Image (cartoon, helix red, strand yellow):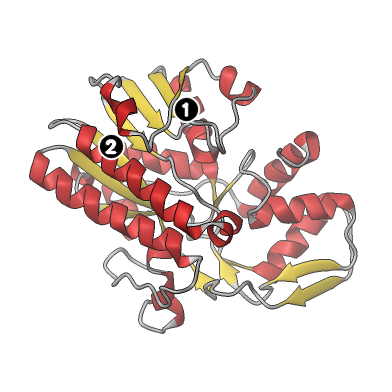
Amino acid sequence: MRALLLGGAGFIGAHLARRLIADGHDVTIVDDFSRGRSDTAISELGAQVVSGDLTDPAFYAGLEHGWDQIYLLAAVVGVRNVEKDPARVVRVNTLVAMHLLDWLQPGERVFFASTSEVYAGGVDAGIVPVPTPETIPTMISDITAPRFAYAVSKLLGEAAFLHTARARGFDAVVGRFHNVYGPRMGADHVIPEMSLRARSGEDPFRVPGADQFRAFCHVDDAVEAMVRLMATPEAAGQIVHIGNDREETNIGDLAKLVLRVAGTSPVLAPSDAPAGSVHRRCPDLSKLRELTGYEPTVTLEEGVRTTFAWYASHGRPS
């Protein structure tokens, strides 16, 4: 099988590439390396690596067809990036999606990486249940808030891929990721960020949003879900939640787990969550299970330990 990973040098993309190569597949990674670094983790994978600007329509003119699977993972993500330059988030995420849609041909199969943020506003508004199925209404509670620029860009992508696929005769699978974490994901997300602060000996230890709840999904489980969905014909035209619904945890308890793994016991200093951060997030995985038989296998403690060990070894990513 030949797989094309657009944005494949990033966090999830690199783990997906490693899995597909281990399964014996031919993998090509395309990335502009603005976020996914051209480092040894990429060069040692054994994939073909192409540097390209996926926001430039001219790039696609030289991109061959004939792929069994195409994954669109390229996007500007992360709260810091979204708050710093929300216009860039909308521009990049939208242009990448639109140019890829112009390039796709009938009979091809593509995975579009989306996010639980597309419905997060409805949770705090009290109209979306948790655990959350795919059938709920999407909702942007405050379009003026910079962090919703990311959600809007992904919601547009969902609609564009599903409707264009139906009109043009290719297969599109939309996967909504829910708090995926693991080694090599940067330093701005909660588990690696806590791990780095715990390792530095921070005391008192800050815990923003200590009263919030999340269901974290290790990247190996997320990759397993993606691989299964792309191998399932019935997943075409579907929005499917991807995550781990077995170990929903309080952020305060997560901090205690990270500190226990780090072997430190500072005083905890809870504080308010960042503005716009949803109080609770946990996916309903009924559809994913029905389609693929997926079950998450990496426990939160195991995942935190391996993630902490990676950051202890590699330090803060540049």
Left or right: 123 with respect to 156?
A: right
Earlier-in-chain disc, 2 versus 1: 1
Residue 41 lies left or right of residue 25; in this view the side is right
In the displayed structure, 24 sits above or below 260; it is above
Callout 2 environment at 10 Å: few (<14), some (14 to 19), or many (20+)? some
Give the residue pinned by disc 2. 100
For residue 284, side relative to residue 110 (left or right) = right
In which quadrant of the rendered view does residue 98 lie?
Answer: top left
The residue singled out by tag 1 in the image is: 17
Q: How far is disc 2 from disc 1 in space, using C-alphas?
A: 20 Å
Q: Position of residue 6 (x, y in %)?
A: 40, 33
Label 2 or label 1, whichever lies nearer to me, is 2
Q: Amino acid at mark 2?
A: Leu
Residue 256 placed where, x, y %? 77, 64
The image position of residue 164, as x and y in percent, is 16, 46
**Residues at circles 2 and 1 in contact by the CB criterion of under 8 Å:** no
Please state which of residues 140 and 53 is positioned toward the viewer in this rendering.
53
SS for callout 1: helix
